[in-house]
Image: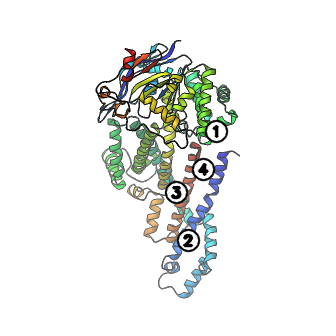
């Protein structure tokens, strides 16, 4: 298997008034061909920063401290802006978090679809564009594409809008789809439909996907592999099966407890108590130590390394001895 | 019929009740004013017979609802009565002045729209820069200038010192330049500010960020997604000021001896020409209603979410 995307020791900080905010710290992440990889973590853990780095759409106060983002073997971070804008939308495309705000409210679907096709596929004829758009809308499960093309965003439901956005995203046959919380703003029933659609597209179109989510349930049903992120670091990674059935890191264990508890109606949701550390003034030890039920002396003093075992990895002192 | 046509028809039909409302209000406002217009016409020493004859002539002896219906009918056919002062029909007087007001208002609005939108775009796209700050300071000072003072300054520099433009009056295109410059200062400043604010707001919107993430060319994003969306707010301001300026610019017209509606209104007030004043007020209200109609339709064409 060859990696479509390989992020190597990526570190990113934001310049803020209070100092450097270390949003992403030494992150390694690989996505193989046709693979769906999930990046799981709570808000503020750095997931979106990773996604924005891949597309190089970081805000101006972001500083790339270190690392490479290899896409098909080429480092995107060293690329000229002009070349990068050719990759955006063509080889890497994006499915947004909130479909309701992701379309221009004053242009109809056809205009927005055709604008994209014109710039990214060089299709200038309106009829040809309409043909392609109708075919793509059909492929994402829209029953009456001709009618939908004439509509404006406010005339479509959230799920329909997300389907339209997915159709636009796959229109250029990208190699990689970055989906940042693609279902979190949708109703539960629509969520699973959109997730199924993304899985279906992954199979049919043969593209790889980075799925960013805070919801382990979503990750479980969609991904081949999971990376768990906490306070800017990867704390655990492995196959979805292994991570769900045999989680190693105490944070992952807590997340899974939570995910399953929320299924039981009477179960009191045991939130992972405490707050993630301040990313401007990081503790010297393990970043999870203040919330960890299994923490011991060493955890507060030293920072654990990411221990690698095959495709599995974990950043916790509980597993340091076993690897040595 | 298309959705847009239905909207336009509905919107045009709405003009009638608004118009009748305005006329009704003005009719009753004038009626509750103290004093009898016939006394004013005939003079203090007029005999009761003359007063009665005048009342009969103007229909003032009839019941109020009849007067109202009569008045409504005549106003809707643009018959505003005859001026006490010049003995010409009010509508004739208004129409002899209105073209001047239109020329002045439209030239001022053209300056305001082009310069205002350009300044707003430049300053929003370079937010925080020297240019941006310069635009903010300039528009703040410009909008705070009293128009008579700005007018006098313009006359002093361009007419008195440089002697390149006429100081007042009408007659040639050159005569329009100074008064329209003076008149444009308020709309220009507002349009520049609103354009800047809406562009900044639109730039932070999710669909613009997504367009960037999809690698659409910057030019295309700016024109199709940023400027186009921002203009929705700007149109409201443009419509408002167009209405205001078409209603006559009393101060500017006085400073530049420009014979427009504003001057006519001032002259009529000075002469207590109530019929004329009433006619001008209704006429200005009609202009406002008409401009609003145009703005609403434009608004709907740009933004399909607009509902009646």
> For residue B98, which numbered disc appears in the image?
3
Disc 4, disc 3: CB below 8 Å?
no
Circles 4 and 2 on the same subunit: yes
Task: Give the percent coordinates (x, y) of residue A118.
Answer: 58, 25
> For residue B27, which numbered disc appears in the image?
2
* Residue A123 visible in this rendered orientation of the protein: no
Task: Give the percent coordinates (x, y) of residue A225.
Answer: 51, 22
* Label 4 SS: loop
Q: Between residue A78 and residue B72, name the one nearer to us.
A: A78
Kindly identify the residue that appears in the image at 51 percent across and 44 percent down: B232
Image position of A165 (left or right of B250): right
Q: Between residue A111 and residue B80, name the one nearer to us.
A: A111
Residue A67, compared with residue B194, is above or below; it is: above
Image position of A177 (left or right of B7): left
Judge the density around disc 2: few (<14), some (14-19), many (≥20) Cα neighbours within 10 Å. some
Residue tagged by mark 1?
Answer: A151
């Amino acid at each position: 298997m060859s990696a479509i995307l390989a992020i190597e020791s990526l570190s990113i900080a934001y310049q803020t008034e209070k100092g450097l905010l270390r949003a992403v710290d030494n992150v390694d992440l690989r996505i193989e061909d046709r693979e769906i990889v999930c990046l799981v973590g709570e808000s503020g853990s750095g997931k979106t920063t990773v996604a924005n780095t891949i597309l190089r759409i970081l805000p101006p106060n972001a500083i790339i401290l270190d690392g490479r983002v290899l896409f098909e073997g080429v480092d995107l971070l060293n690329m000229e802006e002009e070349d990068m804008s050719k990759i955006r939308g063509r080889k890497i495309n994006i499915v947004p978090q909130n479909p309701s705000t992701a379309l221009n409210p004053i242009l109809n679907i056809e205009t927005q679809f055709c604008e994209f096709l014109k710039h990214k596929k060089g299709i200038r004829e309106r009829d040809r564009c309409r043909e392609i758009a109708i075919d793509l809308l059909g492929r994402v499960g829209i029953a009456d594409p001709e009618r939908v093309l004439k509509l404006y965003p406010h005339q479509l439901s959230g799920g329909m809008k997300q389907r339209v956005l997915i159709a636009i995203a796959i229109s250029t046959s990208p190699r990689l789809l970055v989906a940042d919380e693609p279902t979190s703003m949708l109703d539960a029933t629509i969520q699973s439909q959109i997730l199924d659609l993304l899985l279906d597209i992954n199979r049919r179109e043969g593209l790889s996907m980075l799925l960013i989510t805070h919801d382990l349930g979503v990750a479980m049903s969609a991904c081949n592999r999971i990376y768990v992120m906490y306070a800017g670091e990867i704390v655990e990674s492995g196959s979805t099966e292994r991570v769900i059935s045999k989680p190693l890191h105490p944070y992952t264990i807590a997340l899974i407890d939570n995910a399953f508890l929320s299924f039981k109606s009477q179960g009191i949701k045991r939130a992972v108590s405490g707050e993630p550390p301040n990313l401007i003034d990081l503790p010297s030890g393990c970043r999870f130590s203040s919330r960890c039920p299994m923490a011991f002396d060493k955890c507060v003093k030293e920072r654990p390394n990411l221990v690698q075992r095959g495709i599995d990895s974990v950043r916790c002192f509980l597993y340091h001895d076993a690897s040595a | 019929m298309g959705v847009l046509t239905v909207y336009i028809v509905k919107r045009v039909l709405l003009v009638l009740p608004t118009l009748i409302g305005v006329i009704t209000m003005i009719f009753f406002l004038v009626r509750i004013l103290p004093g009898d217009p016939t006394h004013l016409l005939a003079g203090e020493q007029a005999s009761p017979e003359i007063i009665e004859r005048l009342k009969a002539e103007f229909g003032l002896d009839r019941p109020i609802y009849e007067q109202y219906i009569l008045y409504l009918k005549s106003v809707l056919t643009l018959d505003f009565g005859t001026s006490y002062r010049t003995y010409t029909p009010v509508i004739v007087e208004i129409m002899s002045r209105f073209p001047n007001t239109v020329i002045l208002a439209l030239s001022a609005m053209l300056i305001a729209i082009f310069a205002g939108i350009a300044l707003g775009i430049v300053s929003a796209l370079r937010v925080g820069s020297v240019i941006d700050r310069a635009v903010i300071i300039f528009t703040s000072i410009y909008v705070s200038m009293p128009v008579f003072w700005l007018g006098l300054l313009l006359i002093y520099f361009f007419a008195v010192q440089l002697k390149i433009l006429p100081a007042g009056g009408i007659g040639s295109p050159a005569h329009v330049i100074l008064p329209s410059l003076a008149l444009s200062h308020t709309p220009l400043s507002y349009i520049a500010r609103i354009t800047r604010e809406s562009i900044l707001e639109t730039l932070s919107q999710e669909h613009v960020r997504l367009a960037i993430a999809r690698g659409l060319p910057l030019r295309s994003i700016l024109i199709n997604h940023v400027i186009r969306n921002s203009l929705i707010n700007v149109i409201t301001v443009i419509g408002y000021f167009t209405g205001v300026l078409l209603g006559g610019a009393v101060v500017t017209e006085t400073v530049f001896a420009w014979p427009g509606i504003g001057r006519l209104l001032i002259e009529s007030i000075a002469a207590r020409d109530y019929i004329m004043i009433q006619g001008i007020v209704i006429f200005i209200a009609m202009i406002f209603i008409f401009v609003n109609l145009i703005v609403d339709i434009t608004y709907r064409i740009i933004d399909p979410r607009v509902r009646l």
